Structure formats: C-alpha cells, structure tokens
Amino acid sequence: KPVVAIVGRPNVGKSTIFNRIVGERISIVEDIPGITRDRIYSSAEWLTHDFNIIDTGGIEIGDEPFLEQIRQQAEIAIDEADVIIFMTNGREGVTSADEQVAKILYRSNKPIVLAVNKVDNPDMKDQIYDFYALGFGEPFPISGSHGLGLGDMLDAVAASFKPREEKEYGDEVIKFSLIGRPNVGKSSLVNSLLGEDRVIVSNIAGTTRDAIDSPYKYDGQEYVIIDTAGMRKKGKVYESTEKYSVLRALRAIERSDVVLVVLDADEGIIEQDKKIAGYAHDAGRAVIIVVNKWDAVEKDEKTMDRFEKKIRDHFQFLDYAPVVFLSALTKKRIHTLLPVINMASENHAMRVQSSVLNEVVMDAVAMNPTPTDHGKRLKIFYATQVSVKPPTFVVFVNEPELMHFSYERFLENRIREAFGFEGTPIRLIARARK
Ligand code: GDP
C-alpha cells in the first residue's frame, strides 16, 4: 500500500485532516474490540485506493527548537512516504515556517500535494493564490472543520500513486519482522540469522524491497525479514523518539505474517514491551516471544520456567504465543527459532473443514450450555471460517448480543484444542442469521 504523510507547521490542522481522512472504517476484522492503532498512523481509503497515512505532527521530537522539530518531521515524511501532503493555513497566509518546510521538501523527489486548510467558505478562495509562491503548483483549498475540498485534494494524492510495479512477496515466502524496544538485540539477532551458514539470496523473484528487507532461504524455505533497514538505521535525531519507532514497528508488522516480539532477558519485562507486543496482537499477526541475551542470565534448571511464567503473567493476551529463549550473541539455541516461525506461519494460514468445525462447536455447546440473558438463550446455528491470517470464524446465532465474552473465549479455546492454532490469534465473530 502506498504511504501518504501529512507535514506542516503546528496548528495548520494536520490532525483534523488526518482524522477526517481516516474516518470510521468498519470491516469484518476491525469491529473486533481491542484493535489499537496509533493515532499518528492508520490505513485509509479513497474511492478505489487503499493507502496508509501518517500524521507527522504527532511525532514530537524531544526538546529540539521549534523549527528543528518541523524540519525533522518533514524528513520523516520524505523517508517514509510515497506522497506528501504539505499543509498550510489559509487564514494566516504563507509564513516563514512554511517556507522552511518547502525548502526541505524541494530536495525530496517525492510528489507533493499542497493543501491550504481553514478555507471554510468560498469567499476565502482568493487568499489561496499567494500559496503558488511556495512552488508546488496548484494549492488545494480545504476545510478540515467543514470537510470541504478533501475530495479534490485526495484525487491529486491518488493521482501520484505509482502503479505497483511488482507484487510483494509470494505466499510461499514467510515474512517476519522483529519488534522490541531499542537495545534488546534485534539487529544482532538478524545478523546471526543471516550468518554464514545461511544462504543469502539477493533477490527472491518478485521482490523490489531488498534494500529494506532481507530475503534468505534456509532448508528449502524462503523467508524475508521485514524492515531490516529500520533496525539497522541509527543516527537521525527522530529515530530515537518513541512515536517514530512505533510507526516503524507498525509498518513492519503490517507487512509481516509472523512478528517476533524480542525481549531482553537481562533487563526483564517492562511496560513498553507490553505495549509493543499489543500492536502485533491487535494486527492479527502470528506472534512469537523471543527472549534474547539468555547467555547473560545466571541460570539453574528452574530459571527458564520462572521466566516463562513471568511472561505469561505480563502478556496474558498472548497466551497462544510460543516463547523461545536464545542468545543472538553466542548463537546458542538460535536454531530453535526457525522451526517455531514455520509452525506459527502455517497455523496463521490454516483453513479448517467446515464439517469438523461445526462438530467441534456443537460438542462445545453440548458440554457447556450457551449463556442466557433475561430468559433468552443464545442459539448457535452454524460456524464457518471466513478467512485466514489470522483464522477468522463467523458464528451464526439468534442474537449476537447474547454472545458474552467469556463464552466466546470458551469456544475459542475449544477450537484451539481441536485444531491447534499455536502461535496465531484466532477471531470469532457472532453474526445474526439472516
Ligand atoms: P537493537 O537496538 O534491538 O537492534 O539491539 P542491538 O542488536 O543493537 O543490540 C544492543 C546491544 O545488546 C549490543 O551491545 C549487543 O551486542 C547486545 N546484545 C545483542 N544480543 C545479545 C545477546 O544475545 N547477549 C548479550 N549478552 N548481548 C547481546
């Protein structure tokens, strides 16, 4: 999907426009509770175009001076986006801060769409002519608060989407990413995975992203490590800000089948780890918890069990995720990782037979009667798997409101026990039978 970034100095209304564009999107997957999306990054659509959008204004860069912040945000837009919406304010006219942003954007060779916000009524349209001086062609008058002009602006944005030359990686390739806070050892782990005993293939057929991703092949299976560049790149000021690393992680998660949540055995588990793991879970990816730096821990025969118990306490929502202990540094136990990735990936894409699924569900109902509410009982008619990655099941019932969370959990567990979905979340959706 193409990525669109909104840049502009503070108070031009970037977040309002961002929220307008993102809107309320309802889909079969996204009406599941618990979907977290960082406020600065979201998928969106316009007519037939699907894209992702970033509000760079939401990325605060430490205590850098005002102009430096704007500059960094423009750099992020240039680094991350395929098309940039440069937003200004029609009420205030062209300011020197706008000119500063323009100067940075000139140097990018990304398509730029110039938007003049807060043009709330047609009389104000004359005021937009000054904005031609910024040098990005026709300015698009818009009004975030009234929702005006967005269609024309988005047409211009969509017109700049390059046709995707090639498809991304094929289905036979397992795409995985490593996420985790700085210094847990993500880059080191990538390096040891790509070590000399692996065959590094420079180009898997149909890949154009080898500069960002690392494709390789092991034991006949093709893999791509997503966004290796994002892990290796260190140096720019904004790269250490939390929001920016979240943004990178979300993008990597989105392109992955399997997400490795990397923890530091030596430092233990902190709140930030939980938050990061939550993104992978909410996105419906297969998840593996990797405890790195296992070499640095003093151990006896109980240490691993104790650590795993701690993980289970902290990451209750990831009860399906296998835990792998290893050391990227000494490479000890590193060979245990790929088989787990293969397993999780397979389960993430698993389709089960409808007849067997319905037997499992009906047996479950016979074992544990459905809940009642005000004398009305939930009736389950039929269950069917509607999609994979993650496996998603629709359960047709008399009244969806009668499907309580605890009963849903019970059914989910029965389905897991019957089919073994280790490593992947599964989703259950109750729908009224038509
Ligand atoms: P990233 O920020 O998550 O990519 O982390 P790095 O890969 O840059 O690693 C951060 C630091 O942890 C470096 O000094 C590594 O040498 C060290 N490190 C990485 N993996 C291990 C490990 O398995 N054991 C030990 N003891 N140190 C490690």
Image (spheres, helix red, strand yellow):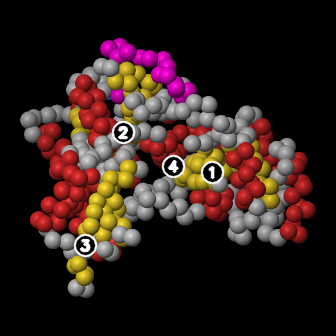
Left of 148 or right of it: where is 286? left
Residue 194 lies in the magenta stretch: yes
The kind of residue on which mark 1 rests is Thr
Residue 111 falls in image quadrant? top right
Tell which circle, 2 or 4, labels the residue nearer the N-terminal end. Answer: 4
Task: Report the mark closest to the observer, 3 or 2.
Answer: 3
Cα gap from disc 2 to disc 4, whole angstroms: 22 Å
Q: Using a 10 Å C-alpha cutoff, classify the residue at mark 3 as few (fewer than 14 neighbours), some (14 to 19) or many (20 or more).
A: some
The boundaries of the magenta stretch are 189-210
Foreground pick, 232 / 408 = 408
| Image quadrant containing the N terminus | top right
Tell which circle, 3 or 2, labels the residue nearer the N-terminal end. Answer: 2
Question: Which residue is labeled 2 in the image?
Answer: 258
What numbered label is drawn on residue 243? 4
Task: Report the mark closest to the observer, 1 or 3.
Answer: 3
Q: Using a 10 Å C-alpha cutoff, classify the residue at mark 4 as few (fewer than 14 neighbours), some (14 to 19) or many (20 or more).
A: many
56 lies above or below 15: above
Task: Report the mark closest to the observer, 2 or 4.
Answer: 2
Cα gap from disc 4 to disc 3, whole angstroms: 45 Å
What numbered label is drawn on residue 48? 1
Secondary structure, mark 3, is loop
Task: Report the mark closest to the observer, 4 or 3.
Answer: 3
